[in-house]
Amino acid sequence: MVMGSLPERSDLAVVGAGVGGYIAAIRAAQLGMSVVLIEKEKLGGHCLNYACIPSKTLLNISKMYYEARNSDGFGIIAQQLSIDPKKMHQYRIDVSSKLENGVGFLCKSYGVEVVKGSAVFISGNKLQLTNGTEIDFTKAVIATGSEPVELEDFPFAEDVIDYKKALSLDYIPKSMAIIGAGYVAVETATLFARLGTKVSIIARSDVLRTFDQEAVEIIKTGLQKLGVKIYRDAMPKSKQGSTIQLSTGETIDSDITVVAVGLRPYTAGLGLENTKTELDSKGFIKVDGSLRTNDPNILAIGDVIGEPMLAHKAMRQGVIAAEVAYGMKSAFDNIVIPAVVFSEPEVAIAGTINGEGITTTKFPMSAIGRAIAMDKKEGFVKIASTKDGLVKGVEIVSEHAGDMIAEAALAIEMGATVEDIADTIHPHPTFSEGVQEAAEAALGRPIHFFYSKK
């Protein structure tokens, strides 16, 4: 599909219309550049159609279903409650379609030419499209993202799938084994366990091993409450029918096996060898602080340039790349990239909570009125600061942690102090008061929690 007439020359060619790519295209068009946006699948890419949006849509549905079935304490007795997985699946499709159409509308409104197909670099200023058409460009942005890693001993098949296909199931499996223990594995386990699937996680060491262990213990308790079984220090050795043999000698029987062991950059078939673009030892495209590759005409953003492989990082880089391509002196110099795991409860972090010269203060969510009212008392807010009170990091384990962490990211970016946060009026009753209370505690003046003297 082509929107408008395909130009033979463009100021900017964007390869990949995921969240980073389409944002780069729109920002460049806002600056007055002629832009062609090339995508082989759907506008919005994997995030909008197969990953971020679908997973959060389904997690929300599963949360409503699970809580309705477990709300006796609130006086809600749900009898004969059931879920229609095909209707749930269709709703998830409709959400993505609505957002994809919205991206298409924006591209059309800004005059971005959208081309359906693949692109190969012929040189540092020319692309060839699937239909053989060639496009000369002044600048190009590579925003091709990443793809799930496949395990050699567990090749993808009808019953061995990646997380994207797991989010496209139109039925609820009776049992599921998840190979991997990162945030994708935890979110997938949470989703299906809430719906009634018997879920097992196979963890090489432990779940979320790069996160703060105090937070991880709460997440593990939440998973176990949902009935998820975690096989720690285990590796999948082989699969015979529906039975998985583990390195520990244990076996798992499951209808579906989900491989969630990571992502790899999507650079195959792009013709980068015809340009001066270089890859690092892990296959990621090398860029400088302004997202320029070794080829002076080509920039790259998002998953394809490395960790952290997060949509919001790609979105910010899309804006920067477009401005650099236009000639502005922009740079990707953000201090912090927040991360969120949509588990039960959620865990979110911005900056660092450890390090030399950093003091960390913790405030429990069990002392927050809104948390008590909603029976969501698990979790805490940790705030890390220097001797001068400069905020260096915040970790939140709580309901709505993913929404609350934006305040922390802003505080770190603007060089705010714990006093700035403590003296800012937070609405009551909300979960966000936990951040303010943690800041108050860091100043030695806690109100709603008593810290015993050491």
Image (cartoon, rainbow, N blue to C red):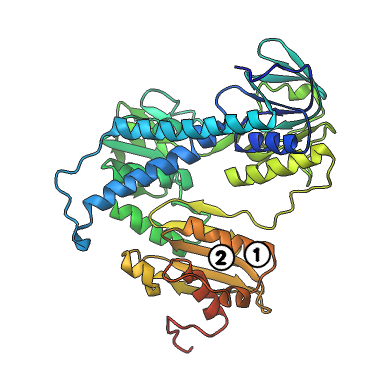
Residue type of the residue flagged with mark 2: Val
Q: Is residue 77 above or below residue 448?
A: above
The count of marks equals 2
Residue 385 locus on image (x, y percent): 62, 73
Residue 14 horizontal side relative to residue 85, left or right: right
Is residue 270 among what the camera can see?
yes
Evaluate if marks 1 and 2 touch, with contact meaning CB atoms under 8 Å apart: yes
Is residue 284 among what the camera can see?
no
Q: Is residue 316 above or below residue 160?
A: below
Provide the residue designation for mark 1: 412
Residue 98 horizontal side relative to residue 228, left or right: right
Q: Is residue 274 above or below residue 379?
A: above
Could you tell me which residue is drawn at 79 percent across and 44 percent down?
288
Calculate the distance from the C-alpha at mark 1 to the C-alpha at mark 2: 9 Å
Q: Which mark is residue 83?
A: none
Q: Quadrant of residue 120?
A: top right
Q: Which mark is residue 394?
A: 2
Could you tell me which residue is drawn at 44 percent across and 25 percent down?
156
- Front residue of 233/432: it is 432
Residue furthest to the front in view is: 109
Q: Earlier in the sequence, mark 1 or mark 2?
A: 2
- Front residue of 344/151: it is 344
Q: Secondary structure at mark 2?
A: strand
Binning the other alpha carbons within 10 Å of mark 1 as few (below 14), some (14 to 19) or many (20 upward) gives many
Q: Quadrant of residue 35?
A: top right
Residue 228 locus on image (x, y percent): 31, 48
Q: Secondary structure at mark 1?
A: helix
Residue type of the residue flagged with mark 1: Ile
Residue 20 horizontal side relative to residue 95, left or right: right
Residue furthest to the top in view is: 132
Residue 178 locus on image (x, y percent): 39, 39
Could you tell me which residue is drawn at 31 percent across and 48 percent down?
64
